[in-house]
Amino acid sequence: MPLDAERARQGVQRVQSWADGEWLVRSIPGRASAKTYRCPGCNQEIRPGTPHVVAWPADGRGDEGDRRHWHTGCWQARDRRR
Protein backbone atom coordinates (compact mmCIF):
# COMPACT_ATOMS: atom_id res chain seq x y z
CA MET A 1 0.00 0.00 0.00
CA PRO A 2 1.49 3.38 -0.96
CA LEU A 3 2.01 6.03 1.70
CA ASP A 4 -0.88 8.49 1.88
CA ALA A 5 0.87 11.86 2.32
CA GLU A 6 -2.17 13.57 3.86
CA ARG A 7 -2.69 10.75 6.37
CA ALA A 8 0.99 10.83 7.28
CA ARG A 9 0.82 14.59 7.79
CA GLN A 10 -2.32 14.48 9.95
CA GLY A 11 -1.46 11.37 11.96
CA VAL A 12 -3.37 8.16 12.41
CA GLN A 13 -6.72 8.35 14.21
CA ARG A 14 -7.67 5.66 16.74
CA VAL A 15 -10.24 5.12 19.50
CA GLN A 16 -9.08 5.02 23.12
CA SER A 17 -11.24 4.04 26.08
CA TRP A 18 -10.83 5.97 29.34
CA ALA A 19 -12.83 6.20 32.55
CA ASP A 20 -14.75 9.15 31.08
CA GLY A 21 -15.65 7.42 27.81
CA GLU A 22 -14.22 6.73 24.40
CA TRP A 23 -12.11 9.30 22.62
CA LEU A 24 -10.89 9.67 19.06
CA VAL A 25 -7.18 10.39 19.35
CA ARG A 26 -4.76 11.41 16.63
CA SER A 27 -0.98 11.69 17.05
CA ILE A 28 0.31 14.83 15.40
CA PRO A 29 3.94 14.66 14.25
CA GLY A 30 6.10 17.72 14.84
CA ARG A 31 6.41 18.48 11.14
CA ALA A 32 2.61 18.81 10.91
CA SER A 33 2.27 21.09 13.93
CA ALA A 34 2.28 24.67 12.69
CA LYS A 35 0.23 26.52 15.32
CA THR A 36 0.49 27.19 19.05
CA TYR A 37 -2.07 25.41 21.23
CA ARG A 38 -2.75 25.42 24.98
CA CYS A 39 -2.63 21.96 26.59
CA PRO A 40 -5.64 21.41 28.90
CA GLY A 41 -3.59 19.00 31.01
CA CYS A 42 -0.87 21.40 32.14
CA ASN A 43 -2.14 24.74 30.80
CA GLN A 44 1.20 25.26 29.01
CA GLU A 45 1.74 26.05 25.33
CA ILE A 46 2.32 23.40 22.70
CA ARG A 47 4.68 25.24 20.37
CA PRO A 48 4.80 24.76 16.58
CA GLY A 49 6.94 21.77 15.64
CA THR A 50 6.12 19.89 18.85
CA PRO A 51 4.68 16.38 18.45
CA HIS A 52 1.43 16.04 20.42
CA VAL A 53 -2.04 14.46 20.33
CA VAL A 54 -5.45 15.85 19.51
CA ALA A 55 -8.49 14.22 21.12
CA TRP A 56 -12.27 14.60 20.97
CA PRO A 57 -15.27 12.55 22.19
CA ALA A 58 -15.96 9.45 20.09
CA ASP A 59 -19.55 8.97 21.22
CA GLY A 60 -21.10 11.97 19.50
CA ARG A 61 -21.09 14.14 22.66
CA GLY A 62 -19.28 16.83 20.75
CA ASP A 63 -18.07 18.00 17.38
CA GLU A 64 -14.84 19.34 15.88
CA GLY A 65 -15.08 22.31 18.23
CA ASP A 66 -14.50 19.89 21.11
CA ARG A 67 -11.09 18.81 19.82
CA ARG A 68 -8.28 19.57 22.25
CA HIS A 69 -4.55 19.47 21.65
CA TRP A 70 -2.57 17.79 24.44
CA HIS A 71 1.08 17.16 25.17
CA THR A 72 1.43 13.40 24.69
CA GLY A 73 2.53 12.89 28.30
CA CYS A 74 -0.33 15.01 29.65
CA TRP A 75 -2.85 12.99 27.65
CA GLN A 76 -1.39 9.71 28.89
CA ALA A 77 -1.44 10.92 32.52
CA ARG A 78 -4.79 12.72 32.47
CA ASP A 79 -6.67 10.09 34.50
CA ARG A 80 -4.12 10.48 37.31
CA ARG A 81 -4.68 14.25 37.67
CA ARG A 82 -7.17 15.82 40.06
Image: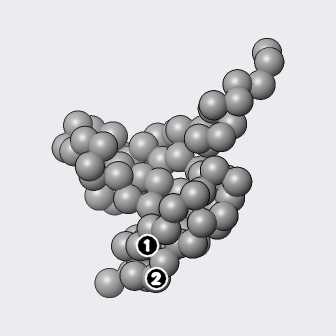
Q: Name the residue under label 2.
A: 44
Q: What element carries label 2?
A: loop
| Spot occupied by residue 17 in the image (x, y as percentages of width and height) | 42, 49
Q: Is residue 31 or residue 68 the one in the foreground?
A: 31
Depicted 28 relative to depicted 69: above or below: above
| Spot occupied by residue 48 in the image (x, y as percentages of width and height) | 60, 66
| Spot occupied by residue 65 in the image (x, y as percentages of width and height) | 26, 49
Name the residue at the left extreme. 61
Q: Distance between the residues labelled 2 and 1?
A: 6 Å
Residue at (63%, 50%) from the top-left corner?
A: 32
Taking the image as shown, residue 13 lies to the left or right of residue 29, namely: left
Depicted 9 relative to depicted 1: above or below: below
Name the residue at the right extreme. 2
Q: What element carries label 1?
A: loop
Q: Is residue 58 or residue 48 the one in the foreground?
A: 48
Determine which quarter of the picture holds residue 59.
Answer: top left
Q: Which quarter of the image is occupied by the C terminus?
A: bottom left
Task: Answer few, some or many: residues within 10 Å of disc 1's Cα (few below 14, many 20 plus, some between 14 and 19).
Answer: many
Which label sits on residue 58? none
Taking the image as shown, residue 55 lies to the left or right of residue 33, namely: left
Disc 1 marks which amino acid?
Cys
Residue at (70%, 25%) from the top-left corner?
A: 4
Marks 2 and 1 close (CB-CB < 8 Å): yes
Taking the image as shown, residue 26 lies to the left or right of residue 67, namely: right
Determine which quarter of the picture holds residue 5.
Answer: top right
Q: Mark 1 points at which residue?
A: 39
Disc 2 marks which amino acid?
Gln
Q: Which quarter of the image is occupied by the N terminus?
A: top right
| Residue 69 visible here | yes
Depicted 43 relative to depicted 55: above or below: below
Determine which quarter of the picture holds residue 49.
Answer: bottom right
Taking the image as shown, residue 15 lies to the left or right of residue 64, namely: right
